[in-house]
Amino acid sequence: MEYINHPFVDEASSYNNFVLGNSIPSFLWKDLPHPAQTWLRSWVAGTILYFLSSFVSYLSIRFLVHRGRLAKDTLPPNKAMIVQMLVAMKALPMYSVLPALSEFLVEKGWTRCYSSINEVGWPLYFVHVAAYLMVCEIGVYWTHRKLHEVKPLYKYIHAVHHIHNKENTASPFAGLAFNPVDGIVQALPHLLAIFLVPTQFATHIALLLLEGLWTANIHDCVNGKSWPILGAGYHIEHHKTYRHNYGHYTVFMDWICGTLRNPEDDIKKGK
């Protein structure tokens, strides 16, 4: 396969070699085509990140329960967490198609990605990151909201996530427990962003990986009183009502669109 943008291919190959070279015997992946290696690297890295972030978050919850800072019922049943892990494991190979596709498009020179921050300078780089995150914020909000409001989309795609994540069974392991189509659709704003916003290539990859950390965090049931960050306290409200807090990283879109529900309101009402 002939590529246009070789610096991006070289950079992606270095990531493939680092992740796969330190996790899988070389005979299993060295002869694979470059896009297949990228997909496999995304799968392996995503799986490692999923379990690492989820277990760290889970152990943190256990510590806080042990110290009396959280109620015992904050810990979900073991059976629920095992089911969440199984759902996530089945979906992860499919999820990994999106980052592999995005890197293929970058390597072909069809996006607005650039390789080095030195190409634009640090001030403009931060402007680009802010614009990228704004595209994701708007895109994830409306994608998530429509997955609830369009009944067939909810029934056949998004319901899987809510079936395994009731307010009393949510856990860090629930973060990737989706129908694979659901997970890909909600990550599409990342793909859209690199066509709209100049984005440093490594930053794009890092922000995709950050999704794994973020989804573990917002399902851990710990209300960190994180306004304006749309943390776990806000997201658990979404799992209670299904009509609020569709946003991604911040309360921004829910506040503008009138779907924001503050977890502190329930605490004041004694719920």
Image (spheres, grey):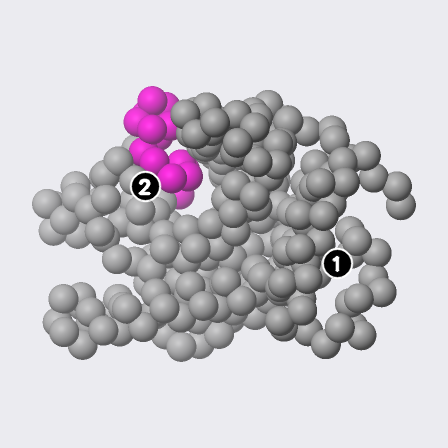
Q: Residues within 10 Å of mark 1 (few under 14, many from 20)?
A: many
Find residue 56 and report its image quarter: bottom left
Q: Amino acid at mark 1?
A: Gln
Identify the element where label 1 is drawn: helix
Residue bearing mark 1: 37
Residue at 66% over, 48% down = 11
Q: Amino acid at mark 2?
A: Leu
Residue bearing mark 2: 230
- Nearer-N-terminus badge (2/1): 1
Residue at 23% over, 44% down = 226
Specify the farthest residue to the front: 118
Residue at 78% over, 67% down = 29
Q: Position of residue 140 (x, y in %)?
A: 49, 35
On the rendered image, what quadrant is the N terminus found in? Answer: top right
- Asked whether, in this view, residue 198 is left or right of residue 258, the answer is right
Point out the stretch of residues depicted in magenta. 240-258
- 2 or 1: mark nearer the eye: 1
Find residue 127 and report its image quarter: top left
Res. 259 in view: no
